[in-house]
Image (tube, rainbow, N blue to C red):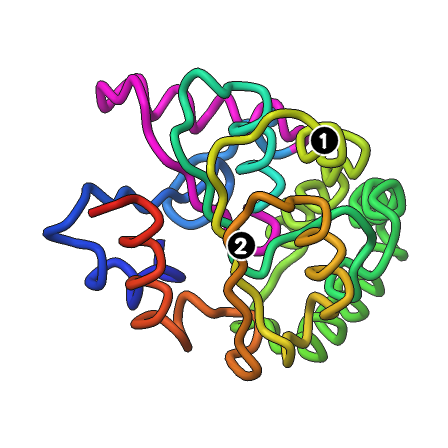
Amino acid sequence: MRDFRYLAPQLSGRLRFVRVDLPGFGGSAAADEAIDSLTGRARAVLALADHLGLARFSVLGHSMGGATAFVLAGEHRERVEQLVLISSVALSLHRGLGLAPATYRRLASGLRLPVVGPLLVRLARAQYRRRRFPGAETLDAATLGLHLRAAAATDFPRIRRAVAGPLPPTLLAYARDDHMVETWISEELARALPAARILVFDEGGHNLQKTRALELGTAIREQLGV
């Protein structure tokens, strides 16, 4: 939720903007299915929409959240009106993920081992520092385990199927100086979505919803027609 604290004011008053902590993160309780599969995450968001009485809604996905947004928009087209992707995971392995998803599954299992586990925690913290992840030094084995399991659920074939199928009107935003997702990754996704509106920044990094909140807010309002 905190990741969108700068973007939310740009949209409030024009539309209902619901910020979501997916299960296992932020203030939401863990749920194995929603941590270990994109299907589970999509179902969690749909359940929230049902709880809020939203028959139709638009979905925004940032970074790894883009994978959930793709599954929602691609497999539940009757519910999703518009799709917004910000610095999103795309069709190919990017440097922020770094390793194949299956490797993260093995690393998550290794965290439970008495000797290997503490070593993996130290190595993971070093990688998080290198990727400028806030609070890297305070990450414990349980939290890292959740992160690794979530990364292991990145299903590129599933994302490619969603992109190839009919999607709702889409806005794709990315920055050329993103330290997590290479420019060619985002450009590859843009070519795969020829009908999408593409918003490219020379600067803004990975968290455009913070660094480019004003411009993004304007673009999203235009995309949604509000």
Q: Residues within 10 Å of mark 1 (few under 14, many from 20)?
A: few
Q: Is residue 224 above or below residue 144?
A: above
Check disc 1 and report its element: helix, strand or loop.
helix
The one nearer the camera, 19 or 34, is 19
The one nearer the camera, 122 or 46, is 46
The one nearer the camera, 71 or 114, is 71
Q: What segment is highlighted magenta in the picture? A: 36-65
The answer to whether 167 appears left or right of 53 in the picture is right
The answer to whether 224 appears left or right of 151 in the picture is left
Q: Which mark is residue 172?
A: 2
Mark before the other along the chain sequence, 1 or 2: 1
Residue drawn at point x = 78 percent, y = 45 percent = 108
Would you name the residue on which mark 1 appears?
Answer: 164
Residue drawn at point x = 82 percent, y = 40 percent = 105
Residue drawn at point x = 44 percent, y = 16 percent = 78
The one nearer the camera, 153 or 190, is 190
- Amino acid type at image mark 1: Ala
Expressed as whole percent of the image width and height from the top left, the position of residue 162 reads 67, 29
| Residue 62 is a magenta residue | yes
The answer to whether 102 appears left or right of 31 in the picture is right
The answer to whether 139 appears left or right of 180 in the picture is left
Q: Is residue 85 above or below residue 74?
A: below
